[in-house]
Image (cartoon, rainbow, N blue to C red):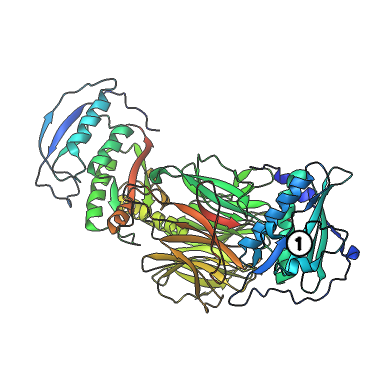
Amino acid sequence: MIRFCFRSQSILVAVIVMIAALAFAPPARSELRIDITRGVVEPVAIAIVPFDGGGGDTGRIGGDIAKVISADLERSGLFRPIDANAFLQTNLSMDTPPKFADWRVLNALALVHGRVTVADDGRLKVEFRLWDVVSEQQQAGLAYFTAPGNWRRIAHIIADAIFKRLTGEEGYFDTRIAYIAESGPQTRRVKRLAIMDQDGYNHRYLTDGTDLVLTPRFSPTLQELAYIAFSDGLPRVFIRSLENGRSEAVGSFPGMTFSPRFSPDSQKLIFSMATDGNTDIYTIDLRTKATRRLTTSSAIDTSPSYSPDGRQIVFNSDRGGSQQLYVMDAEGGEARRISFGQGKYGTPVWSPRGDAIAFTKIAGGRFAIGVMTPDGSGERIVADGYDVEEPTWAPNGRVLAFFRKEPTDAGGGGGRSRIYSVDVMGRNEREIPTPGDASDPAWSPLQP
Amino acid sequence: MLRPVLAAVAVILLLVGCESTPDTPQPTTTTSSSVGSGSTGTGADGGVSRYGSSMGSGAGVGGVQQQGIGGGRGPAQVAQELVGVGDTVYFGFDSYALDSSAQATLDQQAAILLRNTGVSVVVEGHTDERGTREYNLALGERRATSVKDYLVAYGVSPTRIRVVSYGKERPIAFGDSDAAQAKNRRAVTVVSGGSPSS
């Protein structure tokens, strides 16, 4: 397990020196472009060569960086990395163009290679080039500097650059996932806040399991998590800083507070409070602590989520008899029901692109994760199971993560619970590795 | 949490008549007999244990009822008494309504709390696992509040009753059967503190 200090990341990744000027052909429009909005995508064959090293540990790091880039791109479902054992040209250099014919025989459409050296100040310098094998043109050429322990993050950043260059969409590999790690018997489940890179590496626990914790959610702009903790016997919303590890209860309320989500500008938190058998939606200004009640129905109004422009919220309510999704102005007012399919709908989450709302659906004794447009049209199920919940969007709005729990057996065994990712069309479902049972994933924004 | 009860407690064992029905608000006593007084030290614990086994989990239909006299009961004893009459009530799917069986149980819980005014309780609301986590937290709070409201309507001071929802986080029955799910849709009245009242 690789450990590194979170605090150092944003500081030490001193990006980015364009070395396109050194390229042998100017960047040009290419045929190599993946349209990920199409219905079915044939993965693009891509050759990712182990990065050259420049002495010391750099050769090993160069090989590991290539592996991480490969794994990121492969998991996206949009790329098929070619087995390195098949490579013909083994003497690639950053200073001369590749022998494109050697890569065309492998049917590679794209080629990535790079170099790792140690800069004068001791930092790692990682350069890479992305080539279109067919047009023989460079698509990207970048260099990054970072602390040696931070090489994995550089690999994710390079994978994002390749993804963006070839799909036209923002990547999502330089991200983290916070979640709830579960252990112990089902009757007294120990739940801990945990965080890891989106590929499962750099895993660590943030709480010790003393308090039951639930539903972490990332701040869109700050290194913070909002979550629920049962401390002092009352479930309440807390905000935890990922920079210094401090947690603080949000406000002081007479009842249980839960279902927190940040506003897009991170200035406010929207959440539910339950008092006297009634659950309504509130906001709190995180600086002034001013609170505002947005719903007043006698129904259960909960699981609010802001639109990315901050103007609207979507939430679920049983005001019409069963739990359904409603959209409302972010300042309150009339709520408009948007879910009309069979079954109950819960935990809506507005896409960071604004064009879709993900939700949990319960119908016919099964759970499903689905997406619909904000007006309720175009409902599509992307995953299902005995218990699937807590959809969370990758920052590019093209991929979702969620958790799936298997049923327990009558003796309390079973109940395996894991986190999965799936694309917004319902393809390419992948388990995200965790050390044990896992629930309530929250996908971070791209790292600052 | 619960303070051990060390005070000497004089008890009278009340035999509850078999004709008492679940809907009877107060246990009907037909006979009573003293089983001694002035027990000291940890004697109370033994008494509680015998009491628990003789009561089973029957909700006041027959069995044995114990009642403190002149000095009230400690939290540990009240807790056992609540278990005896049934500390748990059950709910229908996605419902927080109290059916007649639940009301009968709560009648007896209320009677115990009215006799032991120094004891406070927390009502824990729970749900089955067939709902989303957050909705179930709200539903558990609704269920716990239903119980609190009923006890308050019976005369128990609201300041003695706190509610907490665990949603679907603390199941007691497993598997995907309807029977297992039904057992998890519950509210449990748990003694949270207090002292013997006089």
Q: Secondary structure at mark 1?
A: strand
Residue A357 appears in view? yes
Which residue in the structure is indicated by mark 1? A112
Up the image or down, A112 lies above or below A250; here it is below
Q: Nearer the viewer, residue B23 or A86?
A: A86
Up the image or down, A408 lies above or below A37; here it is above
Q: Residue A276 placed where, x, y %? A: 42, 56
The chain letter for the residue carrying disc 1 is A
Q: At 37% from the left edge and 47% from the top edge, which residue is drawn?
A: A413
Q: Residue B144 placed where, x, y %? A: 37, 52
Q: Residue A96 placed where, x, y %? A: 87, 61
Screen quadrant of the N terminus of chain A:
top right
Up the image or down, B155 lies above or below B74; here it is below
Screen quadrant of the C terminus of chain A:
bottom right
Q: Nearer the viewer, residue A144 or A295?
A: A144
Q: Nearer the viewer, residue A339 or A160?
A: A160
Up the image or down, B191 lies above or below A327; here it is above
- Answer with left or right where residue A445 lies relative to residue A128: left
Residue A267 appears in view? no
Q: Nearer the viewer, residue B7 or A399?
A: A399
Q: Residue A131 placed where, x, y %? A: 79, 67
Q: Which quadrant of the figure has residue A394?
A: bottom right
Q: Which quadrant of the figure has residue B73?
A: top left
Query: Callout 1 environment at 10 Å: few (<14), some (14 to 19), or many (20+)?
Result: many
- Disc 1 marks a residue whose amino acid type is Val
- Answer with left or right where residue A12 lies relative to residue B149: right
